[in-house]
Image (cartoon, helix red, strand yellow):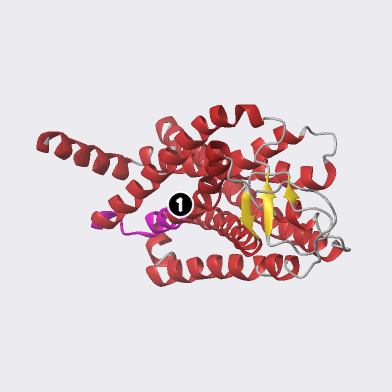
Amino acid sequence: MSDSNTTDFKNPSTFILLGIPGLEAAHVWISIPFCTMYAIAILGNLTILFIVKMEPSLHGSMYYFLCMLAGTDLVLSTSILPKTLSIFWFNFREIDFSACFIQMYFIHCFAVIESGIFVAMALDRYVAICNPLRYSTILTNPVVAKIGLAVVLRGIMLILPYPFLGTRWPYCRTNIIPHSYCEHIAVVKLACADISLSSYYGLFVAFLVRGLDMIFIALSYTQILRAIFSLPTKDARLKTFGTCSSHLCVILAFYIPGLFSFLTHRFGHNVPLHFHILIANMYLLVPPMLNPIIYGVRTNQIRDRLTKMMLKIVDWL
């Protein structure tokens, strides 16, 4: 394995991922919380998918969006963690040139899809709380399918230029990526060419996706909060507000670290590199871990079904 950063090569066949630069001695210890979060994410999201599939009463728009979120979280966390753990545990830092851009595409594509699902779920909550009598007629199964398809196609099409442009830049400076996975800007910065097109397109996608999605979510929850405070009883207000506040916590856990990581790559030159890389990993691991807990355990129907399933397992044992 070569860690050379010399300039006597062009378009290397492999890149070298450093993991978390500056914290190499602590990689094994860092892997423990990372692996724990990944295990919770896998178990939790698979449980959500299983329960919704097995329970006919959960076959509705809210739970379909929840299943889309669970599937997206499984792909998103699996896109980074196996390779990251191989760096931490076995010092396997090399990643094939093509595999790096494939990983880049999956990470950013499913991050955009997840953002779109949050918008769809905010729409679902808005209709359920602000127009409850029309909920079943507005969010029918065909409408939910069209929203889901639009969210997926948006992610696929918007991120397609990332690897398309990135693989066409010449790489002749270094093949060392100071990151634990192939993040878009971290990779294209290694090119010995003017990468303005990739950089500007990345900015465009970030502000188009995260900016517009956050605005739409903020508008939806503003209307939801207005509807909550107009409810006749205090108990009803507290119950509905508790559900919405937990949803907002998950949304903020996804957007805030993501925006921090994105802006730090471009403007945060004074931010310690190890802190930046840790946050970049947290933003792809914490939401997949939290989503099944908050959206699943706090949802009465899923919690009741999970309790019944656990009781059956205990009786069988």
Give the x, y percent position of residue 52. 31, 53
Question: Does residue 253 sit above or below 1 in this rendering?
Answer: above
Label 1 packing within 10 angstroms: few (<14), some (14-19), many (20+) = many
Q: Residue at x 65, y 32 (%)?
A: 24
Q: Is residue 63 magenta?
A: yes
Q: Which residues are magenta?
A: 56-70
Q: Taking 24 as reference, is 273 left or right?
A: right
Q: Nearer the viewer, residue 240 or 207?
A: 207
Indicate the position of residue 302 as horizontal and vertical percent values: 31, 44
Q: Dividing the picture into quarters, in which one does residue 162 lie?
A: bottom right
At x 83%, y 66%, the residue is 197
Which secondary structure type mostly characterizes the magenta part of the structure?
Answer: helix
Residue assigned mark 1: 74
Q: Is residue 84 visible?
A: yes
Of 271 and 182, the residue lying toward us:
182
In-front residue for pair 233/189: 189
